């Protein structure tokens, strides 16, 4: 079979399976996820043996220690995958929820009911745990899933998918509901992105290069998240103790993730006090500041910022700092440089808090909290399938509900249109 | 300026204007729409003069009478556009609605607030009233709009857009919030579809050819509606009087629209009685039936259906009729041939009604009502910007709410992540 036929076949099987899966009861889906968790733990030795092949190949290819660490499966990580599946099993099932129902003047009742999207394609890199995490979320929301992991994790991914498919089969569910693209041929991704008759949504998870490739080549709708350039604005009458705590947390607690702060804006009336203070505190924590002229004046020794610092996603202990004339200037700066991820205002001023909330249309807007909360788990959505920074369908952290759509349902008593 | 630069400039102006428009109060937006309605009526003579140029050109090009009629503006139709704008002004404003807010264990409050999508591109054919209708819906929901109408209506569309832009300017709102592509050059559409940095959503309205062209060439997300192949299934124990009334309405009341019935499925236990009856009634109303073998046996003189009749969108007084073994066969037939628009079951059987509602995942599923109700207005959404038969973002008739997305808002008191 050609690669083309193979990918089409696999997508078609997923589509067929999705019809069955959409009708499966919550109880059976929960049993499936818990069964998958148990099966992964039971297969620990075999999974680690397959993972060892990936690690070996990675070492030969000269992958960095950080990359090899991301690739590694050990008992704790396999347990982590199992725990993740059990947590998703505990989440409420969005399928079948009626989000509203109303009566029309002619007596028909119209409502909207959540249904699965159908088939979801996940294209991801390195970490093999995504295989189990993504499968769990898609299956719980009644969707079939087509997985395409990175070539460096191919043995691990095949082994994990094999275990999970075994549980589907054992419960009498169609094995086509979980498909792993088993080849490392890059052309398989391009083929996958052409299956618009069989796949309803593509979610790429990985670096900007992967995401751009996917969105430029896909005929299927893609939910994208390019980067997180999160801003915090410290207003003139912020509580400076709170502002310091929030800034330190947003920058330092985990600098390598998309909800870490990358640019700090400070009101000019707060600058005299707050710029030296935050420069000292962050400096002691090893953060390199890149400041505007005013920042450099108030915190001597700060690296002067260049144009490319505004809008930069450092993912590191580096922070761009700018003193701004006030709320309007802060909003204008954010609108110009934001990646639409998460923006924070620290203030005690009520009208300013409301204006910031209303006028900033990033996917997450916060008052007096750390941008690090911008996450499906922290928001109470349960596990997160991704974060959307484009506005169609979903905007911000995506949970189970975002893997569904709504159909209209109508209860009539023989009504016809005049 | 090259066409490329011109389209980019126009899209960029719309993006800039959208930032202002997103913050405009409901009162001002309502005044805008009512002002537009008044201005259109006041400009009746001028609009009809411009429309006469399109009609003249259309006649020279040999457009059919039906096409010319669709193109025509008269006093009643201009009044109709104005009424449409006034109706949209009366609808609730979705922007700013908080669809839920909850408290997390650490005390932060997380909610989701509706915001405009930003800039919406509408690509449409023939009827010039779409210029006013689409503008009204987009502006009311706080979006800027870029309109590209058919070349045959160019003078009418330019005149209508000119009147509407005048009202924006008179109210001190940015004129860039309503952009009409003023050239008839087809390349302008292709350029428009590349403005993914400035346009958030494209909605094509027109024939299947237009929609395919747009979705195959767009880098911007597209909400599509290819066709409406609506099925009705008359169950074994349907009330046959009701079934007849619903079938007649769904087929005959307005056969040329997408929510008219195209295929009738009849339970085999109802066929003996219902096939001859509906064949006679529909025959008297001038409907041509194309039936399966059993239908032809029960209603002699019926044209035998060929393969292409299943899944055909006739948009005419033609109906495909098939006798099926039962609910399972009806569901299987619909799943195979449905365009995901609207499907109806007529039944008195409670379990069957529930199974049909649950197992058919078309955008609209009805029990005991005519498919002709499948429409934003009939459902109480107010005016309709389109119908989506793809599942991302919206599924089914789309109202104002579907022109928005939701951002997360967070109220904290200094919380940071552990």
Image: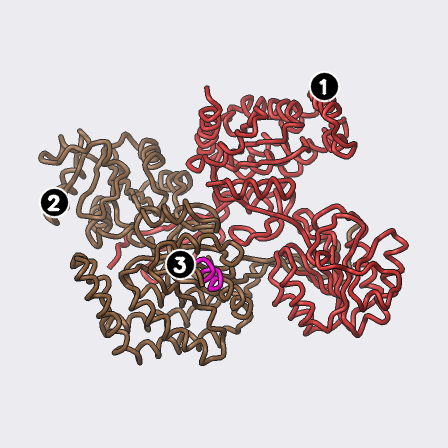
Chain colours: A brown, B red
Answer yes or no: are tags 3 and 1 on the same subunit. Answer: no
Give coordinates of residue B264: x percent, y percent. 76, 61
Question: Over which residues does the magenta segment extend?
Answer: A4-11
Residue lying at 49% horizontally and 24% vertically, measured from the top left: B3
Taking the image as shown, residue A52 lies to the left or right of residue B91, namely: left
- The answer to whether marks 3 and 1 mark residues whose Cβ atoms lie closer than 8 Å is no
Q: Is residue A289 magenta?
A: no
Q: Which residue is mark 1?
A: B49
Q: Residues within 10 Å of mark 2 (few under 14, many from 20)?
A: some
> On the image, numbered disc 2 is attached to which residue?
A283
Q: Residue B120: x, y in percent?
A: 52, 37
Residue located beneath label 3 in the image? A122
Task: Assign a secondary structure to mark 1.
Answer: helix
Q: Is residue B255 above or below residue B169?
A: below
Above or below — where is A323 with respect to A277? above
Front disc: 3 or 1: 3
Which residue is rendered at x = 87% and y = 51% of the image? B286
- Please tell me which residue lies in front, B304 or A97: B304
Camera sees residue B42:
no
A378 lies left or right of B253: left
């Amino acid at each position: 079979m050609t690669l083309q036929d193979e990918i089409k076949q696999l997508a078609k099987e997923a589509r067929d399976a999705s019809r069955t899966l959409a009708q499966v009861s919550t109880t059976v889906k929960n049993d499936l996820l818990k069964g998958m968790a148990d099966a992964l733990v039971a297969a620990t030795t075999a999974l680690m043996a397959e993972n060892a092949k990936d690690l070996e190949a990675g070492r030969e290819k000269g992958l960095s220690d950080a990359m090899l660490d991301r690739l590694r499966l050990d008992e704790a990580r396999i347990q982590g995958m199992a725990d993740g599946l059990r947590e998703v099993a505990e989440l409420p099932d969005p399928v079948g929820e009626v989000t509203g129902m109303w009566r029309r003047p002619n007596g028909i009742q119209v409502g909207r009911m959540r249904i699965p999207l159908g088939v979801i394609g996940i294209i991801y890199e390195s970490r093999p745990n995504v295989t189990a995490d993504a499968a769990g979320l898609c299956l719980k929301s009644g969707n079939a899933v087509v997985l395409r992991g990175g070539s460096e994790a191919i043995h691990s991914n095949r082994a994990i998918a094999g275990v999970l498919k075994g549980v589907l089969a054992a419960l009498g569910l169609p094995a086509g509901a979980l498909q792993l693209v088993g080849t490392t041929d890059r052309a398989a991704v391009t083929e996958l992105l052409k299956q618009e008759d069989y796949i309803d949504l593509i979610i790429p998870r990985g670096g900007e290069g992967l995401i751009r490739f996917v969105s430029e080549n896909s005929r299927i709708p893609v939910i994208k998240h390019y980067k997180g350039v999160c801003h915090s604005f410290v207003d003139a009458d912020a509580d400076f103790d709170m502002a310091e705590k929030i800034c330190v947390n947003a920058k330092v607690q985990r600098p390598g993730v998309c909800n870490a702060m990358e640019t700090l804006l400070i009101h000019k009336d707060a600058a005299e006090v707050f710029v030296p203070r935050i420069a000292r505190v962050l400096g002691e924590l090893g953060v390199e500041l890149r400041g505007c002229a005013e920042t450099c004046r108030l915190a001597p020794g700060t690296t002067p910022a260049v144009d490319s610092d505004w809008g930069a996603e450092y993912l590191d202990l580096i922070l761009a700092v700018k003193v701004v004339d006030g709320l309007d200037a802060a909003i204008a700066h954010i609108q110009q440089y934001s990646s639409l991820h998460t923006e924070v205002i620290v203030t005690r001023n009520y009208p300013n808090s409301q204006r910031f909330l209303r006028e900033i249309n990033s996917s997450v807007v916060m008052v007096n909290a750390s941008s690090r909360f911008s996450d499906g788990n922290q928001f109470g959505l349960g596990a997160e399938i991704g974060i959307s920074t484009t506005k169609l369908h979903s905007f911000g952290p995506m949970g189970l509900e975002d893997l569904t759509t709504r159909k209209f349902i109508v209860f009539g008593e023989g009504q016809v249109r005049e």
